[in-house]
Image (spheres, grey):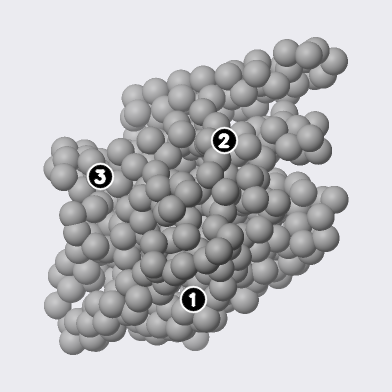
């Protein structure tokens, strides 16, 4: 075995190194009174440094094509790593809880483990390697979801997540087995060469798409999402809604465009149906929600539909739009969850929308930052969310078919609907009167830092054209 091939996997190798360092540090500091500040600073520093190998890594191949990375995949790793770093920063109020504090090291290691699985998933050149990467991300994620194990809701959320993950993995493997039966190989390049439109390959495509649809929580594979998001710790919910979803969406986009290119007419029909259902159904259900984490769950289902809209165009512009949308979605969604997290910790664990009545009177800065993030998610100019939606609409409409235009029209109409339910939260904070609003409180330094990073991204990513150009150059 030629171990020098690991040099072609620098981002993954450095992430494994980070995981080992965190494990040793957590073990060595287990009885030290300085454990928590050291672990916190060490994790944040290592994840920040992890951006460097991702930025500098070149397209490469290793182990006979099992591992194949591209410039676009490396840029996506930068986005996901930055999202993981923000989650680790915003999680500090929850980690400082007297019970959660005992598991700080485990939390950081699980986050890095899921990130490693996402790296492998996006850089796979073989269906089994892709499946292994997906499971490397899913199993630690189930542990994160159930990390508040002393709470019934968290344990229930973890059980639901692992059951759905197991079921979706089985469905996906069933589809992969059909593709192997039809093509005699599982290498992406070889499957693309030998693939032809026939009942067996169509069935394999449907089962594979369905299995990954569960991971992205597209309708009709979304039923686990609201319960899992509500029961999981708020910081983990934010991580699950943006980083995990972004990795799975990028991997699905790459496989559809590369492996299933000969069947583009078949999978585009599936995408049309799933996108329309995801955006419409999620928006209608979001209007009815009064619990903020369930509300954000249906928001994330709708946003997943918009992300997949970029795939419809089956073009380089679509890949760029998907990456840009994910980048903007990371900062906007995590800003909302950062506010929900700090309010939950300061207000006895409540996440009900009614509890935010009069929030602007007592905590005007947090209310303002949350409003900006919600406006970005809704696509209101001049925030970055408007530009991200514009680019995915352009990518989808660029295909030029009447069905693509119809899907874009439905998405545009649903944008107005989403604006209505995002404004419901703004209404609670600014307009609704109450005799007992949330008390004024001071946010900790970690929350302030995470909100500063997210707000800067919301404002700057839309006006700094160099960001989009950087993403576009990586897909050429």
Q: In this view of the protein, can residue 13 be seen by the observer?
A: no
Residue 461: % across, % down = 24, 44
Residue 434: % across, % down = 52, 66
Q: Which mark is residue 286?
A: 1
Under circle 2, the secondary element is: helix
Q: Sequence order check: which comes first, mark 3 or mark 2?
A: 2
Q: Sequence order check: which comes first, mark 3 or mark 1?
A: 1
Few, some or many residues within 10 Å of mark 3 (<14, 14–19, 20+): some
Q: Sequence order check: which comes first, mark 2 or mark 1?
A: 2
At 40% from the left edge and 82% from the top edge, which residue is drawn?
280
Under circle 1, the secondary element is: helix
At 18% from the left edge and 87% from the top edge, which residue is drawn?
402
Residue 228 vertical position relative to residue 283 in the rendered view, above or below: above
Residue 310: % across, % down = 29, 65
Few, some or many residues within 10 Å of mark 1 (<14, 14–19, 20+): many
The reply to whether the C-beta atoms of the residues labelled 2 and 1 are less than 8 Å apart is no
Give the quarter of the figure containing the N terminus.
top right
Residue 282: % across, % down = 47, 77
Under circle 3, the secondary element is: helix
Is 417 placed left or right of 239 in the picture? left
Is 392 placed left or right of 151 in the picture? left
Q: In this view of the protein, can residue 324 be seen by the observer?
A: yes
Depth-wise, is mark 2 or mark 1 nearer the camera?
1
At 56% from the left edge and 54% from the top edge, which residue is drawn?
438
At 77% from the left edge and 62% from the top edge, which residue is drawn?
153
Is 133 placed left or right of 339 in the picture? right
Residue 122 vertical position relative to residue 381 in the rendered view, above or below: above
Q: Which residue is mark 2?
A: 88
Is 346 placed left or right of 258 in the picture? right
Q: Which residue is mark 3?
A: 459
Depth-wise, is mark 3 or mark 2 nearer the camera?
3
124, 239: nearer the viewer: 239
């Amino acid at each position: 075995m030629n171990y020098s091939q690991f040099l072609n996997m620098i981002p993954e190798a450095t992430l494994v190194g980070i995981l080992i360092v965190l494990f040793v540090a957590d073990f060595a500091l287990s009885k030290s009174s300085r454990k928590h500040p050291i672990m916190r600073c060490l994790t944040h520093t290592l994840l920040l440094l992890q951006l460097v190998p991702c930025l500098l890594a070149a397209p490469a191949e290793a182990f006979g094509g099992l591992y194949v990375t591209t410039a676009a995949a490396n840029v996506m790793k930068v986005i996901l790593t930055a999202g993981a770093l923000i989650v680790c920063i915003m999680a500090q109020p929850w980690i400082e809880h007297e019970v959660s504090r005992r598991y700080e090291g485990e939390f950081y290691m699980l986050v890095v483990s899921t990130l490693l699985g996402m790296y492998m998933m996006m850089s796979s050149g073989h269906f089994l390697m892709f499946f292994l990467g997906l499971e490397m991300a899913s199993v630690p994620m189930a542990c994160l979801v159930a990390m508040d194990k002393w709470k019934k809701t968290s344990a229930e959320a973890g059980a639901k997540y692992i059951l759905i993950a197991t079921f979706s993995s089985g469905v996906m493997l069933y589809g992969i087995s059909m593709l192997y039966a039809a093509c005699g190989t599982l290498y992406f390049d070889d499957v693309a060469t030998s693939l032809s439109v026939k009942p067996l390959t169509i069935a394999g495509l449907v089962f594979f798409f369905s299995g990954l649809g569960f991971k992205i929580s597209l309708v009709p594979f979304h039923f686990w999402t609201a319960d899992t998001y509500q029961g999981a710790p708020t910081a983990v919910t934010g991580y699950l809604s943006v980083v995990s979803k972004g990795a799975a969406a990028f991997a699905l986009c790459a496989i559809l465009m590369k492996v299933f290119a000969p069947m583009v007419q078949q999978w585009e029909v599936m995408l049309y149906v799933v996108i329309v259902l995801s955006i419409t159904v999620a928006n209608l259900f979001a209007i009815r929600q009064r619990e903020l984490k369930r509300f954000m769950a249906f928001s994330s289902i709708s946003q997943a539909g918009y992300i997949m809209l970029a795939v419809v165009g089956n073009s380089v512009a679509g890949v760029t739009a998907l990456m840009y949308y994910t980048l903007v979605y990371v900062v906007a969604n995590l800003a909302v969850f950062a506010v929900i997290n700090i309010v939950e910790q300061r207000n006895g664990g409540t996440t009900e929308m009614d509890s935010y009545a009069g929030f602007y009177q007592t905590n005007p800065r947090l209310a303002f930052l949350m409003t900006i993030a919600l406006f970005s998610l809704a696509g209101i100019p001049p925030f970055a969310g408007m530009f991200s939606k514009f680019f995915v609409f352009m990518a989808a409409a660029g295909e030029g078919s009447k069905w693509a235009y119809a899907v874009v029209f439905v998405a545009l109409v649903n944008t107005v609907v989403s604006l209505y339910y995002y404004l419901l939260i703004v209404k609670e904070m600014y307009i609704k009167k109450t005799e007992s609003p949330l008390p004024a409180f001071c946010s900790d330094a970690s929350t302030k830092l995470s909100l500063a990073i997210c707000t800067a991204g919301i404002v700057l990513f839309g006006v700094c054209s160099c960001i989009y150009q950087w993403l576009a150059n990586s897909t050429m």
